[in-house]
Amino acid sequence: MSDYQLITHQDYSKIAFSAMASTCEVLVRNLDKKFCHTIAKIVTSETKRIEAKFSRYAKDNLVYRMNHSNDQSVNIDTETFNLLEYARNLFELSDGLFDITSGVLREIWSFTPNSKPPTESEVKKILKRIGFESLHYDQQVFSMPKDMQIDFGGIGKEYAVDQISKMIKEKCQTKNASYLVNFGGDLSAVKFHKNDPDWIVGLESVNDIDQTASVIKISHGSVATSGNTKRFFEYQGKRYGHLLNPKTGYPIDDAPRSITAFSDSCVLAGSFSSLAMLQGKQAEKFLKDQKIKYICLW
């Protein structure tokens, strides 16, 4: 049984599969089934590789070894080093608000309808396990203190979109086949034929996730959306969103419901949408200061 579905529409083919807890698809303006199966194999193979290597849910991958190193050195490769360096840049740009060691907060926060906030003592205790500055690494080895963890989830899906787009770009160009990579709303598009229509993508409503708030057209470039419309709970009249401040251990106050950012790469688009959300009510000012094109829904 194939790992994907190949669906032919009037003027494009769709490669659909599931990965990284998302519905994934690649749309290609080419109806040649042999060609599209070739693209599909490239896409699914690379996605599986990235997910297997960097998922925090796996029990025998590199991230697992890093998270269970107990202050001992773990060998890493150039790809992992580059992701760590990118995470460091985001940590510094956000003044510590984007921190890949903050995933441990999920141990005390659960964003289901009947949840309630953790106690102050629980928060204080877990904050001791957070801090990118406690990581030690170079291009060959990595270590961090016992009980700390890293999680590449904040950049992993966008990274996969960019990697896949790069891998299929040359093959699609030889066929003059414009394409769109869409991993759960994180997008990368390349247009080769000037007469091809733009791809049309819907943005979810912040009030009803089954409804579309607006649509955007994309022909070239990347788009990513961050938000807290799906994961939240209400307790004693207050709404708690899943975007957590690693400095305080509590949700970011007054953040928009969602931010869609546009950039040349999906990693950059995703990074700026996430960083803006972490700015709370200053989100739009941050994006304007960074000269990022965006759509903000409150």
Image (cartoon, grey):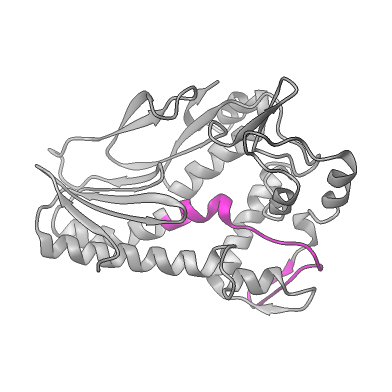
- In the image, is residue 41 part of the stretch drawn in magenta? no
Q: Where, by quadrant of the figure, is residue 62 drawn?
A: bottom right
Q: Toward the viewer: 165 or 5?
A: 5
Q: Is residue 174 left or right of residue 221?
A: left
| Residue 219 image point, x, y percent | 27, 39
Where is the C terminus found, in terms of image quarters? top right
Residue ID at (13%, 52%) = 30
Residue ID at (73%, 39%) = 245
Residue ID at (36%, 59%) = 164
Asked if 5 appears above or below 67 in the picture, the reply is above
Asked if 195 appears above or below 12 in the picture, the reply is above
Q: Is residue 53 left or right of residue 282?
A: left
Q: Is residue 216 left or right of residue 234?
A: left
| Residue 58 image point, x, y percent | 56, 68
Magenta residues, as a range?
Answer: 136-160
Residue ID at (52%, 70%) = 53
Asked if 206 appears above or below 79 in the picture, the reply is above
| Residue 283 image point, x, y percent | 61, 27
| Residue 170 image point, x, y percent | 24, 61
Q: Is residue 108 left or right of residue 122?
A: left
- In the image, is residue 153 part of the stretch drawn in magenta? yes
